[in-house]
Amino acid sequence: MAVVPATLNSTTLVGAAILAVLLLVVLRSFISHSDLDKAIPSVGVPRGPFAFYRGAWSFLKNGRAVTREGYLKYPGRAFKVPLANRWLVVLNGRTLIDDLRKAPADALCFHEGTNSILFLEHTLGHEQHHDPYQATVVRTPLTRNIAVCFPVIRDEVIAAFDDLVPATTDEWTTVPAMQTVLPIISRVTNRFFIGLKCRDPDYIKLTTQFALDVTSDAMWLHLVPSFVRPLAVHLFGHLETATRSAMKHVGPMIQHRLEMDDKYGRDWPNADRPNDLISWLIDEARGHPSRRNVRNLTRTLLNVNFGAIHTTTQGFLHALYNLAAHLQYVEPLREEIERVVKAEGWTKTAMGKMVKLDSFMKESARFVPGGAVMGLRKVLKDFTFSDGTTAPAGVLVAVGVLAEHHDEANYVNGGTFDPFRFARMRDDCGEGTKHQMSTPSHDFLVFGIGRTACPGRFFAVNEQKLMMAHIITTYDFKLKDGVFPEDEWIAVLGSANSTAEMMFRKRK
Ligand code: HEM
């Protein structure tokens, strides 16, 4: 008898707690939306009761279509769409994108924008939230070392493909595309970051799983009030486990580097100091005790992996699917790659001269950028755009990238996949760097734009081109189903198809 009331009581308590949380969310969103309501038109919000939440639910399923609708309805202006508990202001057109590009970080902030979605303090750690020095390291020493580390990176491309796509005979081998490309990119990227330890299967699992854990932790943290988050993360979050596991893999190596750094600085005996991300992070940590320890350096390495692996995998898979769906472009690419390699060898200079390949990769990223919005910023103080629209402090803004990339005003036949369009543009105007993949612009936004445009883009482009050149010169390949596998969309995120299969055989 006593059990029934006890069950009822706990059920009632849980029910009350859920209701309280929902009320908090409703109240918070109501307060934070009120300033915006009149200033910026909304798209994707039906009429009637609970309109915002019905709109937000529908946005989860149709985010791509809703942002497209806003783009067509409000050309060159801003509109807002409902996320689960807040508005997102989407910017259209060159002028507003330029405003976002030029805005100072204390007005439109990339870091706080990311924090609003990912809860950096809880998912990547306190130090990563308050002192994200990895961007400086990626921007300067890492990028400068691409050329000198190129042979090592290529060595890993060959070894990883040999292991995971062993097409040594004339027979076709079928592999799951995503599950094959992801570990290859983890290996190739981490060969540059930490050396040969990149091959450890547990480390590959850790680096590929970490980004998924960060995103899923962030998703459920949105459902929890802020005062409960530290406890919730302590109980259910993945960061601590990932840090401990990463420290098992790279902790002793980092400890040794720190000890050698104390003894010799950068000039180790026999010039033996490894030239990799760990060393460049240690250089940047000099004079900062909070950075210069095994735990912080490990977390920073995890964070760079978080930014590097899935992004590169998505872009690469899109390009691979596009090439396999348009096999007529393999031959011209092969011709270019073999001609350039004959003259330059497998070098970074050679990658720079593969203009058709660059154009192919860029067109693929233009056509399927992997999302409907990019360039997320949080408004830190009321910001008035050139068209007179004011976005109030606290609001999130972003650019409608998919619609920009397909706009006829930006690209002739923007709705058509035209892989050599950027190569032709380079021929026509002779401006080599302007049309290459690593140059962000108002009409090519895959790497973001402005001061925070992805600092890893030079590495990402070289890595993707090298991998694609390797595939084109080593294998024959095709899609098992023959057609471009559809992206998988949630709200404004479009991920490359995760179940498609590819077939490879030794090149005939
Ligand atoms: C194709 C692959 C990649 C894509 C599409 C990509 C995309 C982006 C985007 C959109 C941003 C935000 C820029 C903005 O909103 O202005 C960003 C930031 C960043 N990316 Fe990448 N990324 C890629 C690869 C990489 C790689 C390989 C690394 C590291 C080696 C990296 C490191 C970073 C870092 C550290 C930031 C933060 C910049 C800051 O704090 O200022 N990314 N990336």
Image: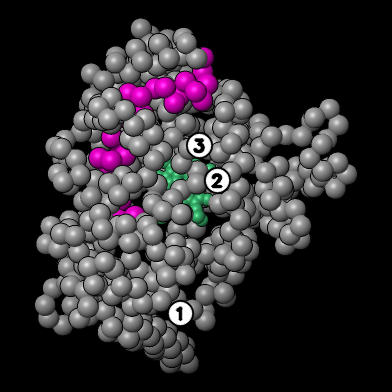
In this rendering, position of residue 491 left or right of residue 124? left
Q: Residue at x 51, y 25 (%)?
A: 348
- Between circles 2 and 3, the one closer to the viewer is 2
Type of the residue with mark 2? Arg
Instruction: Say if disc 2 is inside 8 Å of ligand 1.
Output: yes
Give the camera-side residue of 402 and 254.
402
- Label 2 and label 3: CA atoms lie apart by 10 Å
Q: Do callouts 2 and 1 mark residues in contact (Cβ within 8 Å)? A: no
Which residue is labeled 3 in the image? 459
Q: Residue at x 47, y 11 (%)?
A: 343
Which residue is labeled 1 in the image? 225
Mark 1 lies on a secondary structure that is loop
Query: Looking at the rendered structure, which numbered label has been put on residue 139?
Result: 2
Instruction: Say if disc 1 is inside 8 Å of ligand 1.
Output: no
Instruction: Say if disc 3 is inside 8 Å of ligand 1.
Output: yes
Mark sitting earlier along the chain (2/1): 2
Give the camera-side residue of 220 and 394.
394
Mark sitting earlier along the chain (2/3): 2
In the displayed orientation, state which residue is furthest to the right: 263
Is disc 2 surrounded by few (<14), some (14 to 19) or many (20+) residues within 10 Å? some
Does 364 appear in magenta? Answer: yes
Task: Identify the magenta region.
Answer: 345-374
Type of the residue with mark 1? Pro
